[in-house]
Each structure stands twice: as C-alpha cells, then as structure tokens.
Amino acid sequence: MTTEAEPDPAQSPVANLLAIAPPGCGKTELLARRARHLVTQLEPHQRILALTFSNRAKRNLRERLLDALGPQRFRRYVRVTNFHGHAAEIIRAHGRTIGLDPGAPMPGRSTLDDAIEVYTRGLGSGPAGKRRDEIARALSQAKQGPYDDDQVRRALVLSGNAYAQQIEVDRQEKGILHYEDLLRHAQRLLGVEAVARLYQQHYGAVLVDEFQDLSLQQLDIALSSSSTSRTFVGDPLQGIYTWAGARPTEVEVALRDLCGEPQRLAMSYRSSPAVLSVVNRVSIALGGAPLHAVSPHTWPQGGAAASGVFRTGRDEAQWIVDTSTQVLASNPQATIGVITRLGWRREPIDAAFTAASHLPRQRWDLAIEDSEIIKRIVGSVGLLPRQADMDTVRQAVLDDVDRNDVEALAQTLDALAEFETLVAQVGSASAAVAQLRAQNSHNAIEPGVHLLNAHTGKGQQFDWVFLPGLEDFHIPGSRALTQEQLDEELRIVLVILSRARHGVVVTRAQSLIAKSGNVWNPDASRWWAGVTDACALSIENLRAHIAALPAG
C-alpha cells in the first residue's frame, strides 16, 4: 500500500492514530494492516474491537480482517460490530447497574418510526413528513448524551415538542427501548468506572471506520471501550450524516487533540483515471486535493466516464437496463451500482429492472433481497418439515440471529414480513424459498446490479456506477437551503461517484412523472455542468467502449 520510501501508517508506534483516507485510498486495508500490527502487542486474553456503522460495512471490514489475519487469529483476537450492536452487548451484560432489564427485547430502527406514525397518521404526506422529522430530531437531540430517563423528559419539555414528549412518556411506561436509547445507555454504563475498566482490560485496541460519521456520543463510547490503543480512519469530505447526529468538525478537532497531526493517504487504489477525473472535479470544489490512480496504465482504455440527457425518466431507466445487460454479457462477474440521492428518484429504474428478469439484481431497500438474509431463510426452511407454518419458520430464522445484532435482527424481521407475503402467494414456505435468489459469492458485493441510495452505499465499491437524476430538487434536495446543507449535498455526489472502479455514468431526465401523476420537467442540477464536463464519453459512444473491453 505504500512505497519503500514512505512510512507505513499501519506500523506507527503511536498509541492513538488518526488517518485521513480519501475515497479508494485504502482505508479498510489500512485498518486490516493496523490490526495485524496491533495483534502482536495485545496482552493475554485481550482482543481488538473494530467498530463500523452498518452491517454491510461490518461485512466489508470483516472480510478484509480475515484476509489479513487468517481465520484462526481473526476468531481469537478480533470482534467486529457496529455501534448499536456494541451498545446492545454492553446493556445485556451490565444493564442492571443502571436499573435496566438486560433481558428486554432489543429495538430495531423502525421502533421509533412506528411510534411516530401513530401520532402523525392522517396529517397527509406533506405536513406529516415535516412533523415526523421534527419529532425524530427532538428525540434524537434529547438523547445525545449519557442521560437518564428523567433528564430526557426534561430536555423534551424544553424542546416544546409535545408529540415527542408523549412518545417518550409512552416508551417509559411500557418499559421498552427505542433504537436511539441504546447509545445513551451504553454511554451511561461506560461512565461507570468499574464497567469501563472491564472493557478497557478486555479490548487492547479499538479500530473505528469512517470517523467523520461519528456523533460526539459515539466518539465517547469508542474512547471509553479501550484506553490502550485507538485508531480512527475516515475522510471529512465524505461526511454526509450530520442530519443523523454526526459532528465531523467537532470530532476531527477532538481526534487531532488526542492523536496529533493525521496521517494522510493520497493515492487511489480503487478507481480508474477516467473515474478520478470526475471525482477530482467534485473533490476540488469541496476543498480537497486531486487523487491519482496507483497503476493508471492497467485500466482498459483508462476506464470510462460518460454523461447524457434523456427525454423521460422511463427512457433513462431502460437505457440503464440495456447498458447493464451489455456490461454483464461481457463480464458476468461485474458489479453495477445504480445509486440515487433519494429512493423516489429510482422508482422508474427499479420498475425497469424488475421487468428485466434476466439480470441478477438486488434492491438494498428490500431486506428479502439481501443475500445474507436469503441464505439464513433458505437454510432454516431446509431443516424444517415441508409444510411448516409461518410461525415455525419465523422462530427458526430468528433463532439463527445474534440477538445483540440489532440491525441484523431488524432486517431479518423485515425480510420475514416480505417472505410471509410471498408464502401467501405461492402456498408454502418451501415453494417460496424456491423463488429466492441467493448468490454463492463470498464477496461483500455480489456480481450483478445493485439498486440503492447514497447513504446505504457509503463505504462500498462497484465496477460500474450509474448516477441517475442529477437534477434540481433531487440533487441538491429541496430541503438544502443553507451553504452548509448544500456542501453536504455536494459531498453526497462525491460519495456516489467515488464508489466506481472502472466506469461512472451520470444522467438526467427532462421529464418525470410526479407522485401526483402529473408530468414534471426538472431543471439540471446546479452541479450538472461541473460534473459532466469531466466526462469524456457520451452515452452514445459508451457502448463502443464496453464492447471493446476484454471479456471477463
């Protein structure tokens, strides 16, 4: 990852390391090599805690750590989890210390959404959407610290949001937890000296992926979980979660105070020169430095960057399906990410791929299309009697899920609800299983087409990336009004583009069908010209580029 003349950040002797890694510059590889270095320094019975933000990111990091350490050392020395999973484990083990029931069911992301829905039902989509955001924001802000229930209630009274106050009263009376409660209770528990000491003795090091997405609360949890060695890797230019509580500026200041001047990675191991030409255009606009490909001459034709305008959203969708078909015909192992800012803009594209049954594809917003969950359902049903009812299937599948992995549990419950609908259509669980498609690939991203939005695609990479809908109202979104909000929207564009390895394709439509059924003619995004000027290919000559690529 580095030349002989460069010091290797992974081998740094410092206890606390901060590394800034622009997209594709080897962030996950640095964490894996750092783990390999730190394993030799652990005390007997100590492990390394690796923290991520999602299960897909956890899967990526786990695979890289397995490669770096080997299965035996990985199992012995490393624990990979996301922040909410780590919080759930802490509550399960020590909840009684602060009066919590460790056996209480762990919540999923939807528990608060469901509670909010009860209070906003019937308001209509516009007012209800704004009201939901206000309630969720009030509750989140009231829980961004090691606060007990009384302190949360007082904070909500000060917020003036009556709905949020009532939702919290209902939660406390029922004795349940919402997803947002896990981190504050974990932070409270790690504030107990005896509890913190146990974790600091157990974990000789902590590795944190994507430090720019940390809230101050998550930063405190990471720092309290290990006092010996802390490594933080990320990129401020990819900070796109301030709406969810991330505080990239404050976190970076705190980490610089702890770690000193950050190590910086500057060469792209992911993307072709053509992709980097587009990525650099956006990165420089955000104040970043240009990236260069490590081996520019190894990319066939230097990679691809193309752009084009379509008459309608349906025309755009069908073209993406046809082009994806050509890519996969040339290389069946190719990975293709079709990434939008918001889910509604992908609706005609999702419909077009649903009709294209010849193409392997996953919609990341449908839990039933996640290969890991499909394998879990298929494996559980295969061990049951052929006519097992849905309750038996549900219990068998859930028994296979780590109850501390709140994200996996929530996704599995969503998948089971979708699976139950399929069972009702085809008549039995065994018949429904026959219709599920699980790939046998061991890669974190399976070959085929992946339909997703920008935030769920964070940290992933695809051979090809399509960015449809570079239009006003979609990118930037209608709620981006301040310069700070607009900067974050542009960082979202950077995140989408930088997922691409060989090729990136940027498109927009001149006419869309709105939810009301009316025709809508969006303007080009304010960033359209700046992005597409860096695209050397048109959509017309992109097909010739693909045809000229080596097979496979």
Image (spheres, grey):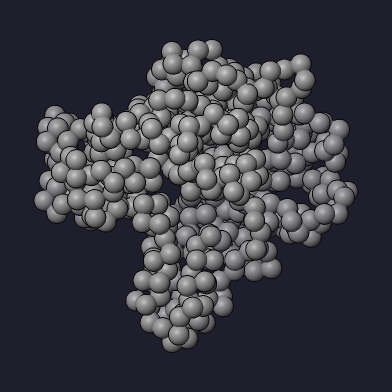
Question: In this view, which residue lies farthest toward the bottom?
Answer: 387
Image quarter hosting the N terminus = top right
Residue 232 position (above or below residue 460):
above
The picture places residue 296, in percent across and down from the top left corner, at: 82, 31
Q: Nearer the viewer, residue 77 or 542?
A: 77
Q: Count the numbered circles shown.
A: 0
The picture places residue 320, in percent across and down from the top left corner, at: 68, 53
Q: Nearer the viewer, residue 16 or 477?
A: 16
Q: Please report the residue visible at 77 percent of the width from the left and 20 percent of the height from the top.
A: 4
Residue 10 in sight from this viewpoint:
yes
Q: Please report the residue visible at 56 percent of the width from the left and 78 percent of the height from the top.
A: 434
Q: In this rendering, would 372 be left or right of 221? A: right
Residue 46 position (above or below residue 173):
above
Q: In this rendering, would 248 be left or right of 149? A: right
Question: In this view, which residue lies farthest toward the front?
Answer: 44
Image quarter hosting the C terminus = bottom right
Residue 414 in sight from this viewpoint:
no
Q: Please report the residue visible at 17 percent of the width from the left and 35 percent of the height from the top.
A: 148
Q: Please report the residue visible at 70 percent of the width from the left and 36 percent of the height from the top.
A: 270
The picture places residue 144, in percent across and down from the top left corner, at: 28, 32
The picture places residue 76, in percent across and down from the top left corner, at: 52, 45
Q: In this rendering, would 249 be left or right of 466? A: left
Q: Nearer the viewer, residue 105 or 136?
A: 105
